[in-house]
Image (cartoon, rainbow, N blue to C red):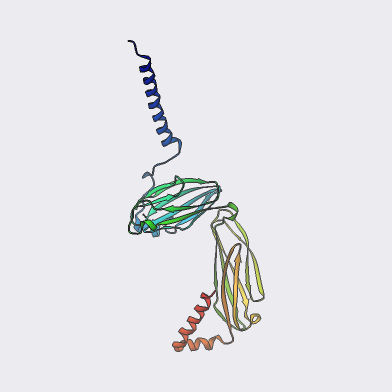
Amino acid sequence: MRIHTYEKLWLVAAFLLIVGFIATITYGSVGLGIQMIDDSEETLSPDDINDDERFGEPRVEQVGENEYEAYVVAQTFIFQPDPIEIPANSRVTFYVTSRDVIHGFDVVGTNTNTMVIPGEVSKMTVEFDEPDEYGIVCNEYCGDFHHTMEGQLNVVPEDEFDMTELEVEADDEVELGDEATVTITVENGALDDLETTATFEIGDQTVEEDITVPGQDSEEVTVTVDSTELGEGDHDWTVTVDDYEESGTLTVAEDLESEDEDGADGGDGSETDEDAEAGNDNE
Ligand code: CUA
């Protein structure tokens, strides 16, 4: 059978086109590493989210040297945590679930994009090399304020990233001559030990305590303050641990008990309480 030269050329061209199409589709589905969300993750009833080990407290957790896991909860019309903070040069696995209806979890400008279905856990692993700030949007219509549902993902420079939390509990008032107690709790969410210094300042007094907080643990330091040295009146204090600071006011009164007795009378007491609270708010 004789085939015309042009006929042959068109046959070859059509064949190459078909091979080309198949190659592009294969590359798009395999080569780019795009994964579909499947149901291989265990299910989680929205009613159980609050008691869930991972989602009860939406957060970022360190699981390896440069590996993190982010447990994210979507609900009308917010994402938790917000912002999500992770260090640059890290590998993050997002686990996202919904508390109510179907939402989307789309990290704008990346191919990190999934549906978030109540009862299901969507899982994605993403690498972030450079510090950057990304918006997160919900791209599934979820209600009246769907268009306002957004979050934030901050990829911060490695040396600016930490998983430290500072909490301070301190006496509001103390009788002149007595000691006031300040309890400083430093939480270390990272895997490595945290060596740091807690600095407590009040009046002219400064107390520095070196502390070592084991990885994924917390450490408590108690500082006592001599009120005689401070004298009567309101004294502002600050606690500093690395970049974190907490502050408050300690009232030293000559005769606290008589004030308490006044308080027992009724009206005066609530006023005193309000005064104390207002004082704290001002800090
Ligand atoms: Cu959530 Cu739209």
- Which image quarter: residue 234? bottom right
- Which image quarter: residue 21? top left
Give the percent coordinates (x, y) of residue 247: 57, 71
Kindly tell me whether residue 119 is visible in this rendering. no
Give the percent coordinates (x, y) of residue 145: 35, 59
Q: Is residue 166 left or right of residue 207?
A: left
Residue sitting at 63 percent across and 72 percent down?
Answer: 201
Residue closer to the observer: 207 or 131? 131
> Height in image: 2 above or below 135?
above
Kindly tell me whether residue 185 is visible in this rendering. yes
Residue sitting at 42 percent across and 32 percent down?
Answer: 24
Q: Quadrant of the C terminus?
A: bottom right
> Height in image: 181 above or below 13?
below
Q: Quadrant of the N terminus?
A: top left
Give the percent coordinates (x, y) of residue 11: 36, 20
How many tags in the picture? Answer: 0
> Height in image: 191 above or below 209?
above
Residue closer to the observer: 52 or 97? 97
Q: Residue furthest top?
A: 1
Give the percent coordinates (x, y) of residue 244: 58, 64
Residue sitting at 49 percent across and 88 percent down?
Answer: 261
> Height in image: 244 above or below 191?
below
